Image (cartoon, rainbow, N blue to C red):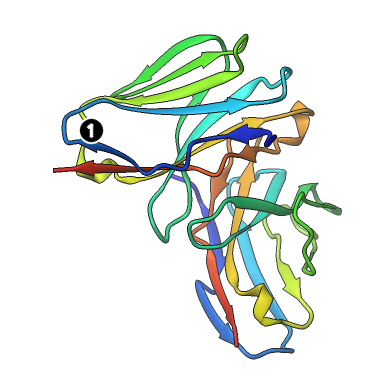
């Protein structure tokens, strides 16, 4: 079992719909969770971070964390074609002070006009 | 805006050559990382550093080496490039766990 798992997709949604991206992780002591967006041929950029159970909203993006279920998700409301990218879930596992992140394989999102 | 730079952006080199990929950041971050990523594939951590004179190997075995003599600089060296080293190399830095990525170096070894 991988430490961080995502469905590789592609996840295809129509423009204006809500895209829901999911991630599970294996280490119960994980404290910090991140969503990165990576366009094809580019480097990852952080779009959301979440540290406590519940929802965190930033514009069209909402991150949801459920530590009991070891599950973190990203919702993108009013999806736009420019949201088409690979979304990487990253978890800070084990030693907090290292700053090391374990990345999932990424979910490719396609938003169709 | 993250201030982390990588040079060169693209490199095509023959087998057996020694290469150094440069990474610099101006944010004063203690932690720096090197990742390897093939097209459409996962990010794999190959090296990281907690600070000056501190380097450790990552989760993916790599024939490359790194050094950290200055806080802002974290170069990666391949002593003898091989076609299997063809990949994208991404450098990142962080103060804690939020990592900022550089633009990457796409390496092709012929």
Report the quarter where the N terminus of chain A lies: top right
Q: Is residue B72 left or right of residue B6?
A: right
The residue closer to the viewer here, B21 or B28, is B21
Identified at 42% across, 61% down, the residue is A41
Residue B48 position, x and y percent, is 75, 50
Classed neighbour count for the residue bearing mark 1: other residues with Cα under 10 Å, few (<14), some (14–19), many (≥20):
many
Residue B64 position, x and y percent, is 77, 68
In the rendered image, the vertical position of residue B38 relative to residue A46, given as above or below: below
Identified at 66% across, 43% down, the residue is B29
The residue closer to the viewer here, B103 or A3, is A3
Report the quarter where the C terminus of chain A lies: top left
Q: Is residue B65 left or right of residue A90?
A: right
Identified at 74% across, 89% down, the residue is B16
Q: Is residue B71 left or right of residue A38?
A: right
Please give the residue where the numbered disc 1 appears in the rendered image.
A79
Residue B33 position, x and y percent, is 68, 51
In the rendered image, the vertical position of residue A41 relative to residue A99, given as above or below: below
Residue A33 position, x and y percent, is 57, 26
Identified at 57% across, 39% down, the residue is A104
The residue closer to the viewer here, A12 or A80, is A12
Q: Tag 1, which secondary structure?
A: loop
In the rendered image, the vertical position of residue A4 relative to residue A43, given as above or below: above
Looking at the rendering, which quadrant does residue B95 occupy? top right
Q: Tag 1, which chain? A: A
In the rendered image, the vertical position of residue A98 relative to residue A63, given as above or below: below
């Amino acid at each position: 079992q991988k430490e961080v798992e995502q469905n590789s997709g592609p996840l295809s949604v129509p423009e204006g719909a809500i895209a829901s991206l999911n991630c599970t992780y294996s280490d119960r002591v994980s404290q910090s969770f991140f969503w990165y967006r990576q366009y094809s041929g580019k480097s990852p950029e952080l779009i959301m971070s979440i540290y406590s159970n519940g929802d965190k909203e930033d514009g069209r993006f909402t991150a949801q964390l459920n530590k009991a279920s070891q599950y973190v998700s990203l919702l993108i409301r009013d999806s736009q074609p420019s949201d088409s990218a690979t979304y990487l879930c990253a978890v800070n596992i084990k030693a907090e002070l290292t700053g090391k992140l374990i990345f999932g394989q990424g979910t490719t999102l396609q938003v169709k006009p | 805006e993250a201030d982390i730079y990588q040079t060169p952006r693209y490199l095509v080199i023959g087998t057996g050559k020694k290469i150094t990929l440069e990474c610099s950041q101006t944010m004063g971050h203690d932690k720096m990382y090197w990742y390897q990523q093939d097209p459409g594939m996962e990010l794999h951590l190959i090296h990281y550093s907690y600070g000056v004179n501190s380097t450790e190997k990552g989760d993916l075995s790599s024939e490359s080496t790194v050094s950290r003599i200055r806080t802002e600089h974290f170069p990666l060296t391949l002593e003898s490039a091989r076609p299997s080293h063809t990949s994208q190399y991404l450098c990142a830095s962080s103060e804690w766990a939020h990592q900022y990525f550089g633009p990457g170096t796409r390496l092709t070894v012929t």
